[in-house]
Image: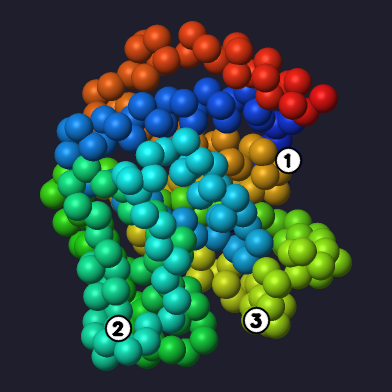
Amino acid sequence: MLDTIDHTLSLDKGKYHESLIKYQVALHALGYQVYVQERPVVMVFEGWDAGGKGGAIKRVTEKLDPRGYVVYSIPAPQGDDAIRHYMYRFWRRLPESGQIAIFDRSWYGRVMVERIEGFCAEGDWKRAYREINQFERQLVDFGTILFKFWLHISKAEQLARFESRANDPLRRWKLTEEDWRNREKWDVYAQAVDEMLLKTSTITAPWTIVEGDDKYYARVKVVKTIVEKLSQELDYDPFSKGLFKTTDKVKEKKKKDRN
């Protein structure tokens, strides 16, 4: 599946800012509807190291009411989490009705890093595909609006971003020896990702693959996808509510700021 991704998709800076403002304003209104209609929302972000997950999440949350969402970056299981079922640390962080939970990496670690690094037996990660599908089906049946994003970049783009971080004193902390070690296993991870996408992209909970070599394109696609699905699930069209009367003024201000 990954071989079919078009890495040339892009947006110029002007179109990026225009589109981002448009969809962020819409998402702000939809975030309020999530609260009013008491619908839980779960967003899962997975992708390559340096794939742009943090940047995408930042643009999703930038205009949301901070009282309405929480972002979880969940590390390897420790303490009580380490002696319980691998899904436990995610189950206990599911959002209440009317709230948004964003997972920066998720239960899919079971069929990627835990599989490849040998942190679980072969039978465990093979069984996990069925467990994950059942788990996500339960969420959706309960009324949860579920998003799953895989941010995909090319191997060459990842190297360029690694080198950029290594040469930037302010961003060097974002690059670790583990990142370089994982890069050496690119082909192994790519095989695992392909299998993951194939076996867990269901009618109930499909994956959205985001072409991420161009950060502008990727960020807009993520926010646009969320706006379109929330509009459908909540039966609320933010573009028909007069929300964009001041959009031109906002765009003009941003244009002046850039100049």
Above or below, 255 relative to 220: above
Q: Tell me the element at label 3.
A: helix
Residue in the image at 55% along x and 69% along y: 191
Cα separation, mark 2 vs mark 3, equals: 22 Å
Q: Which residue is mark 3?
A: 178
Q: Quadrant of the C terminus?
A: top right
Q: Amino acid at mark 3?
A: Glu
User: Disc 2 or disc 3, which is closer to the eye?
Assistant: 2
Q: Which residue is mark 1?
A: 8
- Name the amino acid, label 1: Thr
Q: Residues within 10 Å of mark 3 (few under 14, many from 20)?
A: few
Task: Judge by depth and name the residue closer to the eye, 8 or 166.
Answer: 166
Q: Residue at x 70, y 57 (%)?
A: 154
Query: Relative to 198, does residue 58 appear above or below in the rendering?
Result: above
- The label nearer to you, 2 versus 1, is 2
- Could you say where residue 3 lies in the image, as x and y percent from the top left? 63, 54
State the image coordinates of residue 216 (x, y, percent, origin top left): 67, 38
